[in-house]
Amino acid sequence: MKFCKKYEEYMQTQDQKKLPGVGFKNLKKILKRCRRDTNGSENSFQSQSSSLLNDSAEKSCIHPCPVCDGSFFPSLMKEMFMVVGCFNERAQKVLDVHLATGFRKYFMWCKDKVQGNHGAIIKEGKELVGYAVINAIAMRKILKKYDKIHDSKQGQAFRSQVQSMHMDILQSPWLCELIALHINLRETKGILGNGSELFEGCFLIFKDGKPSLSCELSDVVKLEIDLTCSICLDTVFDPVCLTCGHIFCFMCACKSGSVTIVDGLKATQPTAKCPLCREAGVYHGSLHLDELNILLGRSCPEYWEERLKTERVERIRQTKEHWESQSRAFLGI
């Protein structure tokens, strides 16, 4: 079965959830119209062109291409923005329900009508990961088709642009959290049962003492997420993901952002840059990776206990200094 038909059938099964998707069929029509219009213009020019140029024109159209560029890339960008936004929102809701406790959990069940049992959470999480994977494949295939028709690398350049704008769904920290959630449930409760094939290739692995999430989500989608903090060069503790996609220890991120743990990352200046990619303004939208934190704490308990002790001492010291400075400022000392 061709991917276009497979994708259309998949999206039809998601109609009840009203999930946005890549307009794969419409984008292919734009490319067909591009090829048809270009070939027509080339045929009118045949009398003045060599046979070699005519042969190459049948395979690809000129670039820049007014037929494609005016509608193809803007349409794809808009669709990917909607897909990533929908995925992040739904994944956050699933994880919030799973991590909530007491009255807050009951309130969320009633408010969003979300079933709180593990089976429902697993099913919803699995469907969301499948949704992310198939849309990532759809984007790759349509951009590859664009480059083939135009004999260019504009599709690759667009994909790089999407990644730099943090709109690649496979870069979403919520995907990392969903994978960590399923590994946690699989290894602690053993309740995934049948239908968990999507996560059979997902593991927390240690290579030379350095952890990473290794995930084979499909034949063409493989993820390798490094879990070593590039600041302290140790396993990330209390991990946070900046909006640029890089993961650090919370305390290390606070140090790099020149803020205390009491003030938090939202207190960083807009000019504060990521220590790795040097992109500015990446701290305010940072995300605490709670499921990943649970997974790492369970997988390396000795390191976690030792790190917890040292972090507790540092947190107490910073908190004490913070309130002393606040008291001095209040008293005008």
Image (spheres, helix red, strand yellow):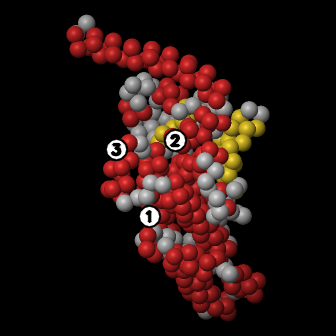
The residue beneath circle 3 is 103
Q: Mark 2 or mark 1: which comes first in sequence?
A: 1
Amino acid, disc 1: Met
Say if 290 sits above or below 166 in the image: above
Say if 133 sits above or below 92 in the image: below
Q: Looking at the picture, tell me which residue is in the foreground, 256 or 203.
A: 203
The residue beneath circle 2 is 289
The residue beneath circle 1 is 82
Circle 2: element type: loop
Q: What is the C-alpha distance between the residues marked 2 and 1? A: 23 Å
Query: Disc 1 vs disc 3: which is toward the camera?
Result: 3
Q: What is the C-alpha distance between the residues marked 2 and 3? A: 22 Å
Q: Residues within 10 Å of mark 1 (few under 14, many from 20)?
A: some
Residue depicted at 56% across the width and 38% down the height? 294
**Percent coordinates x, y for residue 293 in the rendering:** 56, 37
Tag count in the figure?
3
Residue lying at the far top in this picture: please name it: 333
Residue depicted at 59% across the width and 67% down the height? 134
Circle 1: element type: helix
Q: What is the C-alpha distance between the residues marked 1 and 3? A: 32 Å
Q: Is residue 176 visible?
A: no
Q: Mark 2 or mark 3: which comes first in sequence?
A: 3
